[in-house]
Amino acid sequence: MMAADSGETPLALLESDEPSPVELVNAAGAGSVVLVCDHAANRIPRRLGTLGLDAARLTDHIAWDPGAADVARRLSAHLDAPLVLSGYSRLVIDCNRPLRSAESIAEQSGGVPVPGNRGVSPRERERRIDELFRPYHDAIDRLLDGRGARPTLLLSIHSFTPALNGRLRPWQIGVSYGRDWRLAALLLKAFARTGELSVGDNQPYPIEDHVDYTIPVHGEGRGLPGAMIEIRQDGIRTAADAAAWAARLAAAYQLIEAEALHLDRACI
């Protein structure tokens, strides 16, 4: 675990041979949608050890969104869409939480204490922001800036647990939104056409400013129609499951793409 701060120049959080804090897939993709995956990885920087957690906890949903990155990569290929993925665990710093949120660097997650996040100093907090949070969101900004006035939609890919606090969650997939509900409404309509899925309308989570960062900042903040896709984790346990869900999402998106691209960017 990283040593306590002293008057000396602090060590970087990431060592030179560790993976990047952000991965960009198909950056030049010609598709109309930009994909992001905020909780793609469960990796912990070497200097932080395991944050005091055992290996089982670090593979659990408290550390990342299992299956989400696999679905996102496959969806990127279906739609020829650029994709931005976070490179480190949400337990180190959550890339979809406002920096003012207590869940940004959570001392407990899902009822599980995170010892390595207790008493994080202001300097260590800034390291995590500067080396993990900002590079991820800067990459999204650069990608969106590079598209200029080209019509662009934003989808954030997540996964959720089948039960939470003893309550079953019946939805196989959820479409979440905040102030801007327009893209979500089209996607909900597309899923309803088949009638094959149990779909959550702003379930299991709505998008809220005090909880979420990516869609409010990069979507609503830019006037880009956006939505968050949540897939139940027991439906994406295998590569075949992820492939099937990516195909379903691609089909739903393609049904509404033409209509979605005519949404007024300034109308939120």
Image: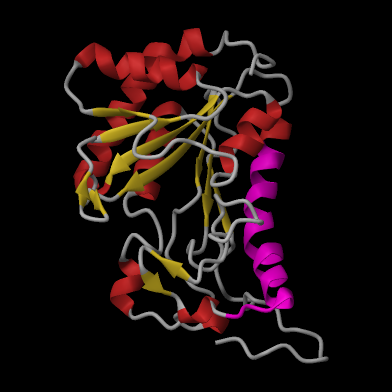
Q: Is residue 106 above or below residue 173?
A: below
**Total number of numbered labels?**
0
- Identified at 67% across, 33% down, the residue is 144
Give the quarter of the image for residue 40.
bottom left
From the top left corner, tell me how far across and down residue 112 is, in percent.
Answer: 36, 71
From the top left corner, tell me how far across and down residue 61 is, in percent.
Answer: 33, 59
In the image, 44: left or right of 123?
Answer: left
Q: Indicate whether residue 136 is drawn in magenta.
A: yes
- Identified at 69% across, 56% down, the residue is 134
Which region shows up in magenta?
A: 119-143
- Identified at 62% across, 52% down, the residue is 136
Q: Would you say the magenta stretch is mainly helix, strand or loop?
A: helix
- Identified at 72% across, 74% down, the residue is 122
Quadrant including the N terminus = bottom right
Give the quarter of the image for residue 210.
top right
In the image, 101: left or right of 157?
Answer: right
Q: Residue furthest left?
A: 196
Q: Indicate whether residue 72 is drawn in magenta.
A: no
Quadrant including the C terminus = top right
Foreground residue among 24 and 184: 184
Q: Is residue 16 above or below residue 70?
A: below
From the top left corner, tell me how far across and down residue 141 is, in percent.
Answer: 69, 40
In the image, 227: left or right of 160?
Answer: right
From the top left corner, tell me how far across and down residue 152 is, in percent.
Answer: 60, 23
